[in-house]
Amino acid sequence: MDTSKPVLQVIKYFDLTVGGIINSILLGRRFHKAPFFGEENMDEFRKLRSLLEEQSKLIYHHSFLMLMIAPSLRHFPYLKGAWQTMKTCSDNLFAFFRTQINLHESEIDFDTEQEPSDLAEAYLRAREMILPSLHSAPSLARSLDERESEMKRLRERRRLREQTGDEGFYSHKQLENVLYDLWIAGLETTTGSLAWLMAYILHQPEIQNKNPDGHQIVRKATMIKTKIYHDSGTILRMRAEIKSVLRPGEEVVTTEHRTQLPYCAAVIMETQRLANLIPLNFQRVTNKDTTINGFFIPAGTAIMPQISSVMYNEKIFPDPYAFDPDRFIDEDGKLKNIDQWMPFSIGARRCPGESLAKMELYLILTNLILNFEILPDDSHRIPTMERTGTTVQKPEDHKLLLRALN
């Protein structure tokens, strides 16, 4: 392969990139793959990815949807197998995180005054402060008598905790749940969003740019169909915006540039609006009787909010099935805040990884566009917009040709 024009399998490499970021934040280790970085921790990543894929396929299978609505059906012969398969997959995921936590805990220096390097370390160190272990006792006492008394007290606390199984809020089980939630919520959704971004911008007209005084110039209406590919207009416009805010000597887009890149933000927002990444939202239950548009919904009713019904509403987003980032740009060229844009859901149970996902999408996309021409691979094939997947819907996996810019 010509290394000056690397061909990347989109979803595969975004999986690795996003997975590395998530694992670095949660457990302090990235996943590296040869030949670019040298292969490190890849067995862990492959195992975790396999478990996540298996669970993703199961969650929205018709049998499991029935079980979500009526869990007691798990005792029926037809559904018992589906329940057991999901439980086994979930148990394997939690076992994976349990192993990672135990390994991580064995490597932590609990006596250091340095800041924790990742979420798990911060959690375990906080736990150690609240539930002191035996090895920390000497540091808590000032004399030999006090040290002995403290050791006895800690032994008794440890014995009671082991008897009751009650470790309070800072338990290993709670940390397992946190890691599980953030991995489940963070990997496929962010990878899917990046894959859709690549698909949409490759489908845009060849010319879609503004001249220096801000007036719209020619927009070529035909999609790219020839075998001679150039960056799509969307990419050209994003790259021009990025270069306009970088100071001399700056070569990397950082978080401090974010508010100065409204069009880049608009492209991401429009992709998330149009992609309908999660067609079926997670189940909720009404906590009181309510009436919506004349329909009575009693308390205890299982419901699934359908966010796409809002983001495809033509009264809010005219021509809703068209990819048009400019709908998020106002007359002054600034980013619009549209309340009905809600890819992360709304309310108290909105996506817990929203801030991380937004930052990942922004940093990965802008730096990719700044440094590379993004083209279809040598087969000249643009990805179709057919949807694949179950829980998270992605475009078909496709290849990109990245040509480094001077």
Image (spheres, rainbow, N blue to C red):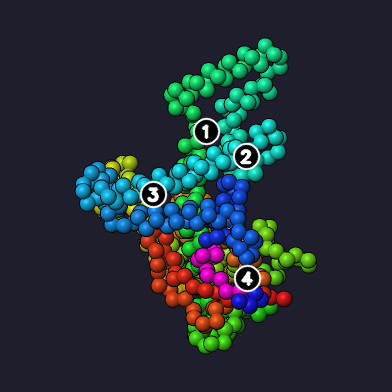
Q: Nearer the viewer, mark 4 or mark 2?
A: 2
Of callouts 4 and 2, the N-terminal one: 2
Element assignment for label 4: helix
The answer to whether mark 1 and mark 4 are in CB contact below 8 A is no
Element assignment for label 2: helix
Give the residue number, with chain letter if any, for mark 4: 369
**Most distant residue in the right direction:** 248
Q: Is residue 27 left or right of residue 70?
A: right
Give the residue number, with chain letter if any, for mark 3: 89
Give the residue number, with chain letter if any, for mark 1: 170
Q: Is residue 296 left or right of residue 393?
A: left
Q: What stretch of residues is rendered in magenta?
A: 6-14
Q: Would residue 155 be seen by someone viewing this image from the given angle? A: yes
Within 10 Å of the Cα at label 2, are there few (<14), some (14-19), or many (20+) other Cα atoms?
Answer: few
Of callouts 2 and 1, the N-terminal one: 2
Camera-nearest residue between 213 and 175:
175
The type of residue carrying mark 1 is Tyr
Give the residue number, with chain letter if any, for mark 2: 107
Q: Is residue 262 left or right of residue 340?
A: right
Q: Position of residue 210 (x, y in %)?
A: 63, 78
Cα distance in 3D space between marks 4 and 3: 38 Å
